[in-house]
Structures are given as C-alpha cells and as structure tokens.
Amino acid sequence: MEFFPDVFEIFEMPEELKLLRDSTRKLVNEKLIPREREIDETGKIPEDLLNTFKELGYFGITIPQEYGGIGAGFTGYVLVQEELARTHECFNAIISANNGIGSLGILYDGTEEQKKKYLPRLASGEWLASFALTEPNAGSDAASIKTRAVKEGSKYILNGTKHFITRGDIADIFIVMAVTDPSKGARGISAFIVEKNFPGVRVARRHESMGSDVVGQAEIVFEDAEVPEENLIGEEGKGFKTAQKVLNDGRLGMAARALGTSKRLFEEAVRYSTERVQFGQPICQFQGIQWMLAEVAALIYHMQWAVYSTALLHEKRPRINKEASIVKFMATEWAWRIADIALQIHGGMGYMKDFPIERFLRDLRALRIVEGTTEIHKNIIAREILRMAG
C-alpha cells in the first residue's frame, strides 16, 4: 500500500524515470526483500543478484549513454536509491560509488581520455569504484588530509593512509585526494584516479562496524605508490573543489536512502500494529501507538518533499551546498527518530533479529555521520546563510 503521494503526481519528471522507479520497486519487492535473511546469514550479496544489477544497468544510472551508462541523471539515481533503501543496505552500498562519488569526479572534471577509459568499466559493473578522502586524523576537517602526492617525471608518488573507505577492500579504482602543495591548504589538494594494481597501493585491513558490513569499509595505504600524470583529475590544486561537487551529490543520496528506509520502517510498523493484539485488541487501537504512526507519517511526508525538490533543483543549479546540507541532516536525523519509533512499536520483537527493524536502526546510524556529520552540516548551512547576508 502506498501511504504517501507519488512524487510523479507532485513533480514534473520524465516518464522514463517513472519506469526506472517502478522497475526498481518491483525488483525490491519480488527479489531483494525475500532474500534479506539469506544476506544477513551469509554476509554476502548473492552472485545472481549482483549479476542482475549488472544486466539491468544499475552500476551506470548516472553515467551518460556515450560512456556506457543509462544516463538517467542524478534525479533518476535518487529515485533508485530510495527504492533500494527499502531493503538491505548492501545494494545501495555496492552501486553507490559507481554512480556517485567514485565516478562523478571523472565525469565532471576528468579528461575525455579518462572518461573513455574508466566510465564504461564502471557503468557495466566490471570495475568497482571507491572514494578515498577520509584519513585517521582528517574526518570532518577534510582539508587537513596528509596524504602527499609529489611529481617525479611523468608520475606522481603518493604516500599516506586513508580509512573508513567504503568498498575499499573490493574496489578496482580509487578517487584519491592528496596534497600536492602543502603551503596552500585546501587549494593545495589534488584528485587522482588510482588503480588498485598500481605499485605501492595496499589494502591494510577491513574495518568492522556496528552495521551489517556486507559491503564494508577498509584502510588503504599508499607507500611510494606510482600514479601516472595522466591520472590527475583536472588541474593540481582543484581536487577539493571536485570533492565538494561530488559530496553534495552524495549528501542528497544519503537523504534519499533515509527516505526509503523510513518508508519501509513505517510499513513494518503499520503492519505489526494491526496484527499484534494486546488487552483484547490490536495495538493500533491505542492512542499512544496512533500518535507514533502519525508522527512518522508527518516526518516522511516532509522528507519526501524536501528530497525531490532538492534533487530537481540540482538539475537546474549545480551549486546546492546549503540545500544539500539541509536535506541531508534533516532526513538522516528524522530517519533515526523513525527507526526508534518503529522499534518501540514492535516492542521486544523489534529488538530481535526475527524482524528487520534492528538491522535498519544499526545501518541508519551511520547516515548521521557519513558524507558529513549533522553538526558539520549545520556549520555549512550557517556559513552559506551568512555568506548570502553579506
């Protein structure tokens, strides 16, 4: 049952995006949700489902057709992320970099040669991408990264360590931010395409987290890693600008995931509240439960409007720093609240692994941290407001 207005009733979007959304919803309901328990038990994405994603073009949703993708744009990808978020987080996690922070830097600022070499392989799912910015001493303060890139002849030599790199242990290429001129701060950071087989690139370890970890994070070490000069994205010193562009896209994607997960949690809460009988009646008849459901419905209604109005704004205006931060922090904070309410409605059963609520709650917790913490986004919003005020 669809509890909320269809976004295609509210916003004007191409019919092909509706077809993409509807086909993804069918895939989620018929093939992905029924296998969530299997994925949890094995800790792996079934090979047949991974092949289905490749065959249907999900690794190249945002990549233009001329480079082997389906060219659905970022709004198309937001629609897909919302639908996939209704099931296990591993599916969004596995395709996210190929459609977002691992490919868009190449698409936005890369050379034509780089686009032709890398984007088709990413679009097909032959290669997986990862985005390597975060370091042990540079998280929220991303401009303070220490990984160094020094030009030697026709190569750059990279030294440093990145951590919490999603897909880091399975990625074929990394978009790496490294310092080329330490005297210039953020303006001295450059972006590079680094293949996993380049000399000096090593996966040091895989992190373990409180989330489901089917697609995990890893620590990547560069020890005199050799990167050809033609793998510099754009110009030296422009890497931080490239990072800011793709991170805005990623932040909007996190909001879409928060929305999709919230809808699934709401569906589960409504279903359970109508089936669970206490004191001689379904618990949905109690005012306390009704108020919980009403609060969740209101939050999702506003979240949906914010996510899609911002996605469509992004199609018209590339710079959405303030708006992306607003929708990211708002949606992820609300989704965390919704997960807590859904678990409370389920009572003790929500805490057990018989139901998916506890897994969604654990995985949602990361969304308030990744792509910038809630507190960092409040800083960005305030900074943008004061900049506009002159």
Image: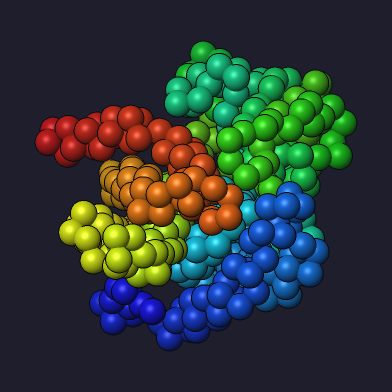
Residue 114 visible, this angle: no
Residue that extends furthest to the front in the rendered view of this protein: 280
Q: Residue 170 or 151: which is nearer the viewer?
A: 170
- Quarter of the view holding residue 156: top right
Q: Is residue 304 above or below residue 189?
A: below
| Residue at horizontal 62 percent and vertical 34 percent from the top | 209
Number of callouts in the render?
A: 0
The percent coordinates of residue 117 (x first, y second) are: 75, 57
Is residue 168 shown left or right of residue 378? Answer: right
Residue that extends furthest to the top in the rendered view of this protein: 183
Residue 269 visible, this angle: yes
Q: Quadrant of the C terminus?
A: top left
Is residue 131 shown left or right of residue 205? Answer: left
The percent coordinates of residue 349 (x first, y second) are: 48, 51
| Residue at horizontal 78 percent and vertical 26 percent from the top | 204
| Residue at horizontal 38 percent and vertical 79 percent from the top | 1
The percent coordinates of residue 143 (x first, y second) are: 48, 24
